[in-house]
Amino acid sequence: MSEQYPPQPQQPGYGEPQQPGSNGLATTALVLGIIAVVVSFIPVLNVVVWPLAILGIVFGAIGLSKAGKVRKGKGAGITGLVASAVAIIMFFAMNALFFAVDKASKELDKSYDSTAVGDGKSKTGGAKESEVMKDFKVTKCDVVTGDLGIKEMAIHVDYANHGDRRYSYFVEGEVLADGKKVNDFMSTAENLAPGQKFTDKNAGALVNADEIKDARKLECKTIKASRTDF
């Protein structure tokens, strides 16, 4: 009689295809990478790309390493790594483009022949006086008594268009009392023809004479001047 042996327990997975395990890190890297790429197209706000992309790269690398063991997540890990790297590149590209466009837009918004002044030099420090500065001059800066006996600030600005076309002018400045700023003044001249002259006697309308009536020295300092052609 042949001897009977009890059946041996089958080893787990023996003779059957091994089921792939899970790889959540690779999946997480893929999601983070995709979100980072989308956000990278939004200038300024895309600063959040950095934590997303860095986590995407870290999780992608770990998930890719794990993929060899669990036989799952290799594609997601690689895609997460690539997407995160692309998001970082797009961050720099989009911000550079945004600031270039913003700078160009500001340049276009500037008035023709516009300049900021103070000492007869351009804002950039050049020694050449701007053309617009030759077309006006503050000729009076004083406290006077008006028709009703009321003290008021008198600032007169004389304009003379030395150009070859019609211009309108806008001048901004500060009133200094004993070297200290007490207020601002503004002056305009509209649509002056070549060679035409004009005196603006209302530039001191914004200044309260009570603030400067006791000053020993008054100054009217031009800060910005611009002219626009027609």
Image: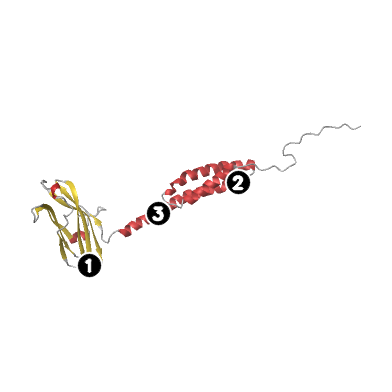
Q: Where is residue 122 in the image (x, y as percent from the top left)?
A: 24, 55
Q: How far apart are marks 2 and 3 (CA)?
A: 36 Å
Q: Mark 3 points at which residue?
A: 98
Q: In this view, does 65 lie to the left or right of 2?
A: left
Nearer to us in this view, 128 or 89: 89
Pointer 1 or 3: first along the chain: 3
Pointer 2 or 3: first along the chain: 2
- Who's the residue at 47% across and 50% down the image? 39
| CB contact under 8 Å: marks 2 and 1 | no
Q: In which quarter of the image is residue 110?
A: bottom left
- Residue 61 shows in the view: yes
Q: In this view, does 76 lie to the left or right of 118?
A: right
Amino acid type at image mark 2? Lys
As helix, strand or loop, the secondary structure at mark 2 comes to: helix
Q: Distance between the residues labelled 2 and 1?
A: 71 Å
Q: In this view, does 78 lie to the left or right of 5?
A: left
